[in-house]
Structure formats: C-alpha cells, structure tokens
Image (cartoon, rainbow, N blue to C red):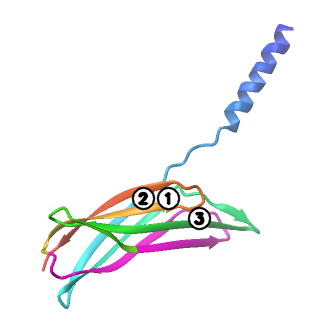
Amino acid sequence: MKKIFTFLVLILLFVIGCSKKNEVKLTTSGKNAFAADVDGSWEVQALTELHGFDQQKKDGNYTASIFYSVDVITSDGKILKSLFTKQVDKKESEKITGVKLEAQFNINGSYPAGRYKLVFNIKDILSNKTLKDTASLKLER
C-alpha cells in the first residue's frame, strides 16, 4: 500500500510540475534613438525590438498584436505624452521571435538642445502585459 501511495504522490508531483507554464516577460533589445534638426524642428526616430509577447496559432499562422506609444521627457523634466502611437498586428507562418517597434515624429523646434528621454509604453494585447522602456536621446544643432 505504501508503494502505491508513494507512486501516486510522485505522479501527482510530476503532473503539477509539468503543468506550470513558464512565465515569459516582455523585454526589448536594440534600443536606438536619434534626432535631426529639420527646418527648425526636431525630427525624432526611435526603434526597439520586443520579445516575450504572446502569440496565437490559427489556421497554421502565428499572430501577435502589440500597441505602443512614445512619450518624451525633455531636458527640463516636462513630459510630452503620446507623441507617437501605433498598433502592430503581425502574422507569420512560423513562430514570431520579435516585433520591431519604430517611431518617427516631430518635436517643436523651440525645445532646447540637450539630453532627452524617450519612453516606450508597450502593451501586448493578447496577454494584457505591459512594459515601459526608455531610450536616451541627445538633441544638438
């Protein structure tokens, strides 16, 4: 009887251990941001690549859906909210390893040169996970 009980406990532990889903966190890589003085205003370009998002497989295709916006924190601490927003819906025949998040927008030329921070506000629509990530930017004429 002890052997059967021990065997059942081991099977139960094995089933519980195998049923745990590995929690994958949203991460970014390859952050890059730069700006150029174009006709008296700043043209900003920023990009990063997102990993760890959820995917759905349907009809042999993988799909992912990401929403993101970009805020700018100026050199004097002001926050310029949602200067860029976009939703990326990606569909591929193979598992999606990363989604490029690119932003391009203008900032009024009256903002002075200096160090700025871009804040990517990212939401994985399928899992409802969110991530805030930053990239540094230097405005110089």
| Residue 50 sits above or below residue 13 on the image | below
Residue drawn at x 76%, y 25% as measured from the top left: 12
For mark 1, does the 10 Å Cα neighbourhood hold few (<14), some (14 to 19), or many (20 or more) residues?
some
| Residue 56 sits above or below residue 24 on the image | below
| Residue 106 sits above or below residue 51 on the image | below
**For residue 30, what is the image quadrant?**
bottom left
Figure quadrant of the N terminus: top right
Q: Main secondary structure of the magenta part?
A: strand
For mark 3, does the 10 Å Cα neighbourhood hold few (<14), some (14 to 19), or many (20 or more) residues?
some
Asked which secondary structure carries label 1, the reply is strand
Residue stretch in magenta: 85-111
Q: Which residue is mark 2?
A: 28
The three-letter amino acid code for the residue at tag 2 is: Thr
In this picture, residue 86 sits left or right of residue 6: left
Q: Residue 12: say if magenta.
A: no
**x, y percent for residue 117:** 25, 64
Of callouts 2 and 3, which one flags the residue occurring earlier in the amino acid sequence? 2
Q: Which residue is mark 1?
A: 51
Of callouts 1 and 2, which one flags the residue occurring earlier in the amino acid sequence? 2
Asked which secondary structure carries label 3, the reply is loop
In this picture, residue 102 sits left or right of residue 106: right
**x, y percent for residue 122:** 45, 62
Q: What whole-number distance in Å separates the C-alpha atoms at marks 1 and 2?
A: 6 Å
The three-letter amino acid code for the residue at tag 1 is: His
**x, y percent for residue 24:** 54, 48
Pointer 1 with pointer 2, Cβ within 8 A: yes
The three-letter amino acid code for the residue at tag 3 is: Ile
Residue drawn at x 24%, y 77% as measured from the top left: 35
Between 136 and 119, the one nearer to me in the picture: 119
**For residue 32, what is the image quadrant?**
bottom left
Residue 132 numbered mark, or none? none
Q: Which residue is mark 3?
A: 96
